[in-house]
Image: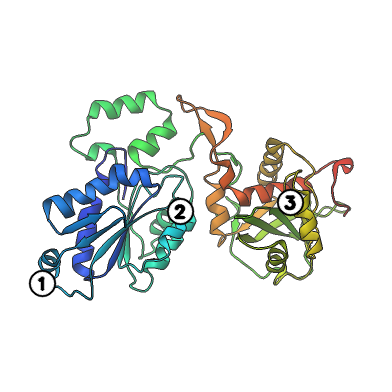
């Protein structure tokens, strides 16, 4: 359910969830919001209004973040009560995807899942929790960017996938929403902001950094179906170090697209693999990164201060060169230039990369104009990895090259 601000979407969620509980029977159910404060501010009060105050189905336990059906509530819902099969609604938040991994649920309600803090790993974790019961999920949100929600849900519904459905409506579908306020927003807000927040229509927001990347199939966009990459194609790896999030982007170059006499990396690059893991030694990371590769790829990664990481990886059998440039904006320009020239093609099943690409944006000021600051920059590890290797391959002067081809 995509709805404009104050359209009433959050109020609908508890009613949908109670219907699912009636249909699916006793067991566990989950409610998820982007952050814990948002849960307490919006979704939880709406849930308790129906389940606790109106229907008297049970009690919410704040320390456990769980609502448990009482014996009377279960009897009125299912016609019977089995103490060995309690019915519990668990509450979680997407900013901590690991908090969602323990439950096995029969249905889920996700409120404001379009927000930037509700990222793809949380969505995937929720689907895993529902897989055993083939449970349904309701998303109630306003769209905020062009990331996973559009790519993995709305685009599939539009393409006719029977497992997905989208209902969209303006803020004014709520009869209490003032028409005058809707028209004020139309006249005074930037067009992209009005479409997103008052009409719930996906549009490219101001500040989206990779303006030349199109998340669509070729030739209009930069996506292609997966194919077997020939072993003889040159391989390149961009690497972003981290104790919790070590990320990598693997590219293969089609030698046939390289101009006569041009250096490696100037042809069409196919992003065919991504890597993201934490809690491993450099040796373990290197082993996983090289697993299945036909050889050791040319690798560039890390910031200029991370020489120790590079030394550790080199000792583990994966030499990593220092990036040729320090300035983030210059690196972004090089990647944007590669997209503008259609030099990067992305396998369409790399959902983690695609989600990051279409949500990587600058903060906007109160007028809706982009600023220099990158929003949640520390979360985009794959794009940092990409920037390191593409900056190395994109026409870097010989005096600044870290690797000799």
Percent position of residue 134, x then y = 34, 71
In primary-sequence order, the first of circles 3 and 1 is: 1
Check the image and report above or below for 199 versus 22.
above
Q: Residues within 10 Å of mark 2 (few under 14, many from 20)?
A: some
Quadrant in the rendering for residue 63:
bottom left
In primary-sequence order, the first of circles 2 and 3 is: 2
Please name the colour scheme applied to the rendered image. Answer: rainbow
Secondary structure category for the residue under label 1: loop
Q: Are marks 2 and 3 in contact (CB under 8 Å)?
A: no
Q: Residue at x 34, y 27 (%)?
A: 185
Separation of marks 2 and 3 at Cα, in angstroms? 27 Å
**Residue topped by disc 3:** 301
Position of 174 with respect to 236 (left or right) is left
Q: Are marks 3 and 1 in contact (CB under 8 Å)?
A: no
Separation of marks 3 and 1 at Cα, in angstroms? 61 Å
Q: Residues within 10 Å of mark 1 (few under 14, many from 20)?
A: few
Secondary structure category for the residue under label 3: strand
Q: Residue at x 25, y 52 (%)?
A: 13
In primary-sequence order, the first of circles 1 and 2 is: 1
In the image, which disc is placed on residue 96? 2
**Residue topped by disc 1:** 79
């Amino acid at each position: 359910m995509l709805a404009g601000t104050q359209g009433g979407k959050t109020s609908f969620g508890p009613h949908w969830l109670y219907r699912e509980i009636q249909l699916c029977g006793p067991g566990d159910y989950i409610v998820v919001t982007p952050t814990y404060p948002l849960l307490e501010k919006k979704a939880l009060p709406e849930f308790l209004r129906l389940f606790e105050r109106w229907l008297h189905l049970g009690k919410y336990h704040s320390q456990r973040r769980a609502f448990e059906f009482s014996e009377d509530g279960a009897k009125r819902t299912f016609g019977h009560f089995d103490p060995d099969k309690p019915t519990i609604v668990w509450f979680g938040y997407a900013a901590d995807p690991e908090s969602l991994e323990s439950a096995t649920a029969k249905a889920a309600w996700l409120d404001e899942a379009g927000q930037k803090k509700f990222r793809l790993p949380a969505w995937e974790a929720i689907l895993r929790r529902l897989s055993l019961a083939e449970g349904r999920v309701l998303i109630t949100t306003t769209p905020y960017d062009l990331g996973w929600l559009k790519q993995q849900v709305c685009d599939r519904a539009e393409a006719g996938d029977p497992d997905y459905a989208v209902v969209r409506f303006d803020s004014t579908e709520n009869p209490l929403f003032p028409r005058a306020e809707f028209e004020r927003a139309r006249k005074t807000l930037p067009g992209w902001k009005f479409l997103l927040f008052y009409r719930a229509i996906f549009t490219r927001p101001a500040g989206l950094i990779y303006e030349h990347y199109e998340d669509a199939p070729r030739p209009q966009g930069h996506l292609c179906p997966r194919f077997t990459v020939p072993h003889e194609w040159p391989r390149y790896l961009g690497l972003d170090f981290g104790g919790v999030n070590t990320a990598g982007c693997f590219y293969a170059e089609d030698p046939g697209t390289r101009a006569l006499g041009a250096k490696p990396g100037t042809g069409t690059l196919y992003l065919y693999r991504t890597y993201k893991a934490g809690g491993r030694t450099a040796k373990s990371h290197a082993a996983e990164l090289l697993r299945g590769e036909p050889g050791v790829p040319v690798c560039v990664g890390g910031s200029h201060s991370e020489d120790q990481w590079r030394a550790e990886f080199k000792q583990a059998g994966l030499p990593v060169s220092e990036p040729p440039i320090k300035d983030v904006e210059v690196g972004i320009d090089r990647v944007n230039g590669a997209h503008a020239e259609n030099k990067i093609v992305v396998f369409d099943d790399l959902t983690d990369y695609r989600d990051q690409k279409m949500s990587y944006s600058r903060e906007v000021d109160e007028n809706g104009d982009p600023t220099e600051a990158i929003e949640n920059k520390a979360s985009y590890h794959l794009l940092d990895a990409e920037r390191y290797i593409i900056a190395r391959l994109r026409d870097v002067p010989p005096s600044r090259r870290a690797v000799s081809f």
